[in-house]
Amino acid sequence: MDIAQQTTWRERLAAYYYLCRFDKPIGTELVFWPTMWALWIAAKGVPNLKILLLMILGVVFMRAAGCAINDFADRKVDGAVARTKDRPLATGVIKPIEAIWVFLILVAASACLLFFLPIETFYWSFGALFLAFIYPFMKRYTHLPQVFLGAAFSWSIPMAYTAVGQTPDLTCWLLYFGNLAWTVAYDTQYAITDREYDLKIGVKSTAILFGKYDIEIISLLQAASVLLIGAALFREALLVPFGLMALLVVAADFIYQWTKTRDRNPQLCFWAFRHNRWVGLIIFAGIFIALL
């Protein structure tokens, strides 16, 4: 009898909970805040409550779906990495086909939300689905899986624009690429924690690609994100004073992250990754106050 058959229904329910990373909301937060930046800017203030709730549910469902397909893709290597060896697929509590079903159900739940949004949002959703599906497999073919993650995490920005009836414009794309640069930066911090294991098992990442220049390139990406987001806020007359104040706090936080990670301690790099939840919140606070 295999492990999956030996578990109780409570243990299996808990395993599905862990598969979707509901116990680790940091990933959801990192998608949620940029979505809120775009939603507030596109709506020129507080968005319609229905659209707000639909976008929040979409973030939760698609992030959970991404985790399920990620664990399916990594099911043969997670057991060799200390941080991921206890994931449900790595331990055998959940079978690979079950992870696929979880992914499909969550995607279907997300698709149901689209019935209450403009048709343009439906068209843009295909990009989100494509990126969510291919990202987990990119680490086998390229050293730039973090770029694919950034593209996936940022896709909710143009979708937020279409959700409120706006066409993605230059401001939207400045936010998109600013968020993409930030995502590559923090996911490289995350990848540094696994670099030793990734090198052994042949998995690729920007942490490996950047090598001894990893911390410097992370800082450059963070600076690029501040400049691009700042340009977006400038175009919408949201930069002075509140947007600028928020970005100055974020820049100070990035410097603080550098002081903690410059020695490449894996635990501190993981701390810095998690600390980025405050970056998204601070930028949103600046946008929110500026639009009051």
Image (cartoon, helix red, strand yellow):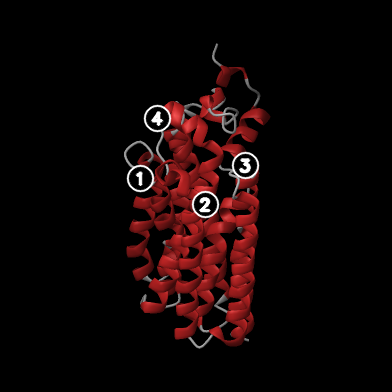
Q: Nearer the viewer, mark 1 or mark 3?
A: 3
- Name the residue nearer the viewer: 174 or 46: 174
Circles 3 and 2: CB atoms closer than 8 Å? no
In the rendered structure, the answer to whether residue 177 lies left or right of residue 192 reads left
Frontmost of labels 2 and 1 is 2
For label 3, the residue is: 265
Q: Give the mark nearest the N terminus, 1 or 4.
A: 1
Residue at 61 percent across and 64 percent down: it is 279
Locate the N terminus and report the quarter of the image it occupies: top right
Residue 215 is marked as 2
Say the numbered circle drawn on residue 134. Answer: 1
Element type at mark 3: loop
Q: Please report whichever mark, 2 or 1, sits nearer to the chain's N-terminal start.
A: 1
- The residue that label 4 is drawn on is 202
Q: Quadrant of the C terminus?
A: bottom right
Towards the viewer: 239 or 85: 239
Q: For marks 1 and 4, give the CA distance.
A: 18 Å
Labels 1, 4: front one = 4
